[in-house]
C-alpha cells in the first residue's frame, strides 16, 4: 500500500488541507448515497447488482461527461476517497465476518475455499501473462476479483499493486459480467445436478460449491436464493470464509511484489534496494483484527449493523471515486484480452471448482 491509514496525522504538511478535500468528498458521498438507494431496488438486487457496482457505474458516467469541468477543485477529495476511505472500508468489512463462520462449513469447506482461491489465482497469473500477454497488474486484479470476493478484492489489491484506475475498472467490469451470468447459471446447474449427480446431492453441498466459486457476496446471495434457504445459508457462509482469505493474500502479494522489485532492481545497486522495501498492507492486519474482535461478539447487533452501513458507504465512495477517474478510452485500450482471461477463470471456477468440491467432499467422507 502507499501509506498507512494514519500517515496523514504524522505528516500534516504532505497532504491537502481538509478544506481542499470537501468538494471531492461531497461528490463521492453523493454518488455513494445514490448508489446505495439504487442498490435497494428489487430488480437490481435480484440480479446481484450491489451498491458498489452501481457506484462505479455512476462514477464513470460522471467521470466521462461533466466531471472534467470541476475536477481541479474535487481532485484531492476524490483521491482521498479512492485511497484512504478504501482502506478504512476494507478494515470495517471485517465486522461482517467471525471466526465462528469457519465452524459452520468445517475444515473441508475451508480447504475447498483455499484450493479454489489458490488455483484460480495461479491460473490467472499463468494464463494472463503467458497466454494473453497481459501486464502483471491486470492479470492479478482480474484474478483477485474472480478468486476471492469480486469488486472488494480488486479494490483491496489496488493499493498493494499501485495499479492505474482503468486497470482496476476493467477488472471490476469482468466481475460484473461473469458474476451476473453466474446468478442465472448456478440455479440451472443445481437443477441439472439433482438429475445427474456431478456433485454430492443436497442443497448444502451445492451451497458450498456456490459460495466457493461465485464472485461477489451479492451474487452468491442472488444465485443461492433460487436454490432454497439451506443452500443460501451455506453458500453465504462459504463465501464469507473465502473473504477472510483476502488478508493473507494481500500480505503474501506484498511480500512477493517487494521481492520481485528487489530482483529486478539489483543491477542498479543499493539505491534501488532502498526503494523496494516490503510495502506492508497494514489495513490487511487491521482487517484480521476486526474479524477476531467481531468473533468475541462484544458489540450489540445494532452497533454492528450501523458499522456495516458505514462500511458500505465508505466502499461505495471509493468505488465512485474510482469511476470518476476512469476514462472509457483507457478501457477500450485494454481490449478484449482481460475479458477472455475472466471467461477462462469463470470456466475454471465452474468446472475446476466443481471437481475440487467433489474431490474434497469425497475424501473428507
Image: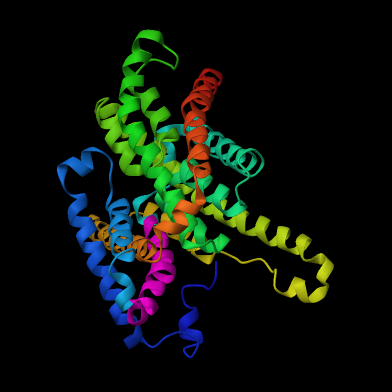
> Percent from the top left, x then y, of residue 211?
40, 34
* Residue 43 figure quarter: top left
Asked whether, in this view, residue 211 is left or right of residue 225, the answer is: right
**Quadrant in which the N terminus is drawn:** bottom right
Above or below — where is 25 with respect to 242?
below
* Residue 260 figure quarter: bottom right
Asked whether, in this view, residue 272 is left or right of residue 192, the answer is: right
> Percent from the top left, x then y, of residue 65?
29, 65
Visible residue check, residue 153: no
Above or below — where is 3 with respect to 352?
below
Visible residue check, residue 289: yes
Asked whether 75 or 41 is in front, the reply is: 75
Q: Residue at x 50, y 24 (%)?
A: 351
Asked whether 53 or 333 is in front, the reply is: 333
> Percent from the top left, x then y, of residue 126?
65, 40
Asked whether 343 or 260 is in front, the reply is: 343
Q: Is residue 84 magenta?
A: yes
Describe the colour scheme in one phrase: rainbow
**Quick one: which residue is furthest to the top in this view?**
195
Chief SS of the magenta region: helix
Q: Residue at x 46, y 49 (%)?
A: 171
Q: Residue at x 54, y 71 (%)?
A: 2
**Quick one: which residue is furthest to the left in this view?**
42
Magenta segment: 71-93
**Quick one: which residue is furthest to the bottom in this view?**
13
What number of labels is visible?
A: 0
> Percent from the top left, x then y, of residue 8?
47, 82
Q: Is residue 316 magenta?
A: no
Amino acid at each position: 500500500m502507499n501509506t498507512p491509514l494514519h500517515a496523514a496525522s504524522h505528516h500534516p504538511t504532505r497532504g491537502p488541507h481538509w478544506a481542499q478535500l470537501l468538494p471531492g468528498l461531497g461528490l463521492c458521498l453523493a454518488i455513494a448515497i445514490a448508489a446505495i438507494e439504487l442498490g435497494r431496488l428489487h430488480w437490481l438486487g435480484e440480479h446481484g447488482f450491489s451498491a458498489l457496482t452501481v457506484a462505479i457505474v455512476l462514477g464513470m458516467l460522471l467521470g466521462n461527461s461533466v466531471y472534467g469541468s470541476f475536477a481541479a477543485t474535487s481532485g484531492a477529495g476524490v483521491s482521498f476517497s479512492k485511497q484512504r476511505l478504501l482502506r478504512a472500508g476494507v478494515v470495517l468489512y471485517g465486522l461482517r465476518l467471525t471466526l465462528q463462520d469457519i465452524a459452520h462449513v468445517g475444515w473441508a469447506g475451508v480447504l475447498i475455499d483455499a484450493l479454489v482461491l489458490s488455483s484460480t489465482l495461479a491460473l490467472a497469473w499463468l494464463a494472463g501473462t503467458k497466454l494473453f500477454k497481459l501486464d502483471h497488474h491486470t492479470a492479478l486484479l482480474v484474478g483477485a476479483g474472480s478468486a476471492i470476493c469480486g469488486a472488494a478484492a480488486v479494490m483491496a489489491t489496488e493499493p498493494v499493486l499501485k495499479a492505474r484506475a482503468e486497470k482496476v475498472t476493467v477488472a471490476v467490469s469482468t466481475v460484473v459480467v461473469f458474476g451476473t451470468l453466474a446468478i442465472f447459471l448456478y440455479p440451472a446447474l443445481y437443477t441439472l445436478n439433482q438429475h445427474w449427480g456431478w456433485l454430492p446431492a443436497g442443497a448444502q453441498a451445492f451451497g458450498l460449491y456456490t459460495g466457493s466459486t461465485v464472485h461477489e457476496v451479492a451474487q452468491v446471495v442472488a444465485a443461492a436464493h433460487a436454490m432454497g434457504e439451506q443452500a443460501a445459508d451455506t453458500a453465504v457462509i462459504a463465501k464469507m470464509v473465502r473473504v477472510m482469505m483476502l488478508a493473507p493474500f494481500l500480505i503474501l502479494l506484498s511480500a512477493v511484489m517487494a521481492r520481485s522489485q528487489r530482483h529486478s532492481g539489483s543491477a542498479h545497486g543499493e539505491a534501488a534496494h532502498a526503494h523496494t522495501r516490503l510495502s506492508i498492507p497494514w489495513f490487511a492486519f487491521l482487517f484480521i483484527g476486526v474479524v477476531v474482535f467481531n468473533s468475541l461478539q462484544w458489540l450489540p447487533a445494532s452497533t454492528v449493523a450501523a458499522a456495516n452501513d458505514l462500511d458500505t458507504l465508505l466502499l461505495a465512495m471509493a468505488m465512485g471515486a474510482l469511476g470518476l477517474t476512469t476514462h472509457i478510452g483507457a478501457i477500450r485500450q485494454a481490449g478484449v484480452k482481460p475479458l477472455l482471461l475472466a471467461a477462462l477463470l469463470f470456466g475454471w471456477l465452474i468446472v475446476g471448482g466443481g471437481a475440487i468440491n467433489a474431490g474434497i467432499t469425497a475424501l473428507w467422507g
